Image (cartoon, coloured by chain):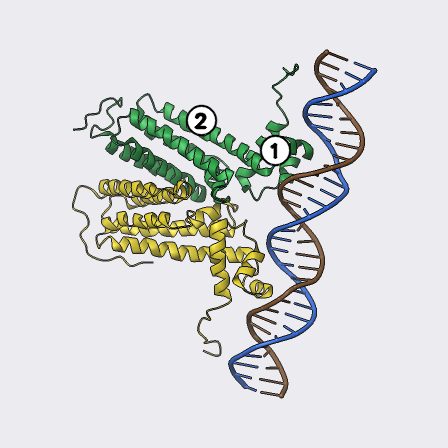
Chain colours: A yellow, B green, C blue, D brown
DNA sequence: CGGAAGGTAGACAGGTCTGTCTATCTCGTG
DNA sequence: CACGAGATAGACAGACCTGTCTACCTTCCG
């Protein structure tokens, strides 16, 4: 209220993050130099370093974008599968299929980032936080679905998901996503039990 | 050849590869400079470049070592599970558990390598070849086990395996391996037929 | 003895990387 | 208008990285 009640400006910082997203994801973090990001985003070096005192700061901001994007796709795919939690657990794998099919798909930005940074670093920790939050969300849905052991089921499903993300980046074949979804179906079916799938009811809030 | 029958030298090249293995795996490929490898392996620069004209050559040699090591552990774990192919399909996940528990575990060297190299590069291709060969082996075992769809089953199991490798590098919790194995058990059981773990895989009583 | 093969030590070139710093320009607001 | 905030352009420092090259040394073997 005092002075800077100005709304988010559509420039500078956003352009940097956007460019970083594109380059980091496509070529890797270490392979992408600050100078290139500066050139491609069309800002001055001083401006860049004002917003991001170090490259690591930018990397973390990049991962925030990845987090938002991927979580959004996951939630959207789950919701598109219908109101039943058990169906959503399977449906979220459509996000994997869509991602694999996308041009320039290079796997999970987080896994890739973690692969080139030391455990314990900020970047690595950010990755762990992301994976933890995804698993927590899946766990909640699994609980709604009436799974006998939501922890184990969410762990199994995210394992499948991460596997799809990792190997999908390699052979880029959509088979992986199809098989992952089918496997998820089998696991969910077994874990929820022979009883009717959790009836539609409450729709779980998204994080 | 004249008379150089004095072949087996336990030195030079091997020391380089061994050092590279340790450093590449622990810190990543790009993060590890040639100079450090040279210093730590105790060879001269000229010697290094005689054996490996470029860093990429060394990286490929490193991946060969990783391939051998990991494939060996996989096969050993499978064999340790007994003679029944269906049991072996589940047992191979013990290799994952052992790996996760090891000090300095940093996930799959191949996935990490692929994460920091461009698709289409030699290193990337080497990774794809490795993953393909593992999957082919699992497929063969699945076939022996009498799986209805060995391709799908092998794909599902390697998905689980890759997921465990990728996420195990993050939270380093052995839970992942336990859940992966249990999931594998469920998937194998469902794919091999209703006869739940009926000893040898020949007994396919699928209706 | 003599010579070839291969190892050692380290300077060097040329490029790239992160991050700092100066100097100028623009613009909104008091 | 004046002023300060924030952007721009780009030189620069210092480190590091890959790869080349010279020069010397050891060892084996005919």
Q: Is residue C15 left or right of residue A98?
A: right
Q: Position of residue B48 (x, y in %)?
A: 65, 33
Determine if marks 2 and 1 fall on one subunit. Answer: yes
Callout 1 crowding tier (Cα within 10 Å): few <14, some 14–19, many ≥20: some
- Dot 1 falls on a residue whose secondary structure is loop
Q: Position of residue A65 (x, y in %)?
A: 43, 58
Q: In this picture, is A173 found above or below B89?
A: below
Q: In this picture, is B25 found above or below B192?
A: below
Picture residue at 58% right of the left edge, 31% below the top: B17
Q: Specify whether residue A65 is in view.
A: yes
Q: Position of residue B195 (x, y in %)?
A: 21, 27
Q: Chain of mark 2?
A: B
Q: Earlier in the sequence, mark 2 or mark 1?
A: 1
Q: Position of residue B165 (x, y in %)?
A: 42, 39
- Residue at the spot of label 2: B72
Picture residue at 22% right of the left edge, 42% below the top: A189
Q: Chain of mark 1?
A: B
Callout 2 crowding tier (Cα within 10 Å): few <14, some 14–19, many ≥20: few
Residue A198: give its label.
none
Mark 2 or mark 1: which is in front?
A: 1
How far apart are the alpha carbons under marks 2 and 1? Answer: 25 Å
Front-most of B43 and B164? B43
**If the image is split into quadrants, where does the C terminus of chain A sit?**
bottom left
**If the image is split into quadrants, where does the N terminus of chain A sit?**
bottom left
Front-most of B151 and B30? B151
Q: Is residue A72 left or right of residue D1?
A: left
Residue B52: give its label.
1
């Amino acid at each position: 209220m005092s002075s800077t009640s100005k709304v988010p400006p559509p420039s500078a910082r956003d352009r940097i993050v956007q460019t970083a997203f594109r380059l980091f994801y496509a070529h890797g973090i270490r392979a992408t130099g600050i100078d290139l990001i500066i050139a491609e985003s069309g800002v001055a070096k001083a401006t860049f370093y004002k917003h991001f005192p170090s490259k690591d700061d930018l990397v973390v901001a990049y991962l925030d974008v990845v987090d938002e994007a991927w979580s959004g796709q996951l939630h959207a795919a789950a919701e598109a599968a219908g109101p039943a939690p058990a169906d959503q657990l399977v449906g979220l794998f459509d996000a994997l299929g869509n991602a694999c099919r996308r041009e320039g798909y290079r796997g999970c930005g987080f896994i890739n980032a973690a692969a080139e940074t030391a455990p314990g670093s900020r970047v690595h920790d950010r990755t762990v936080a992301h994976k933890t939050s995804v698993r927590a969300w899946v766990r909640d849905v699994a609980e709604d679905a009436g799974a006998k052991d939501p922890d184990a089921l969410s762990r199994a499903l995210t394992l499948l998901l991460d596997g799809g993300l990792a190997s999908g980046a390699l052979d880029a074949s959509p088979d992986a996503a199809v098989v992952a979804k089918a496997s998820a179906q089998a696991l969910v079916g077994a874990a929820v039990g022979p009883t009717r799938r959790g009836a539609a009811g409450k729709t779980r809030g998204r994080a």
